Amino acid sequence: MNKFGQFGIKRVAKGFEGDKIKMSKILDREIIVHAFRIEESKVKEFKEKGSVKCLHLQIEVNHELRIAFTSSIGLLDAIEQIPEDGFPFTTTIVRDNDRFIFT
């Protein structure tokens, strides 16, 4: 009989921890980004505007783990360029005209 360990199945990424926090609550504040994932956006209004991706951020604010969601192209593009060994990192998210960016 087979044993599960023989299949070489890697553990699926564990879910993020903490309560959801609005982007407006973390703007211009230093945060720690622990992890991210990108999924298809479930927000109808964003899809209609062409934003089909949603960035899920596992962050730490004031020593508390929180989860933030955004369809910001600026943040999506930037976070995909960070190497895996670059996490966690500190940053501040700021509004630059109508988009968010990491500083």
Image: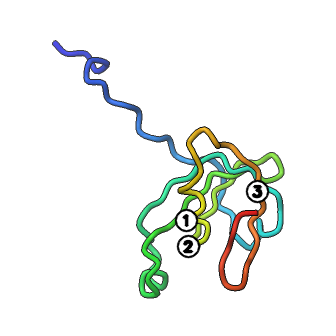
Q: Amino acid at mark 2?
A: Ile
Q: Please provide percent x and percent y for residue 55.
A: 54, 63
Res. 91 mark: 3
User: How far is mark 1 from mark 2, CA to CA?
Assistant: 6 Å
Asked whether, in this view, residue 92 is left or right of residue 78, the answer is right
Up-down relation of residue 25 to residue 37 (above or below): below
- Which residue was labeled with disc 2? 73
Q: How many marks?
A: 3
Q: Quadrant of the N terminus?
A: top left
Image coordinates of residue 73 in percent, x first then y, are: 55, 73
Dot 1 lies on which element? Answer: helix
Q: Secondary structure at mark 3?
A: strand
Front position in the image: 51 or 83: 83
In the displayed structure, does residue 6 sit left or right of residue 83? left
Q: Quadrant of residue 67?
A: bottom right
Residue at 42% across, 74% down = 52
Element class at badge 2: helix
Q: Residue at x 26, y 18 (%)?
A: 6
Q: Which residue is mark 1?
A: 77
- Marks 3 and 1, Cα distance to the nearest angstrom? 15 Å
* Residue displayed at 65% across by 79% down: 99
Question: Hey, what amino acid is under mark 3?
Answer: Thr
Query: Label 2 crowding class (10 Å Cα cut-off): few <14, some 14-19, many 20+?
Result: some
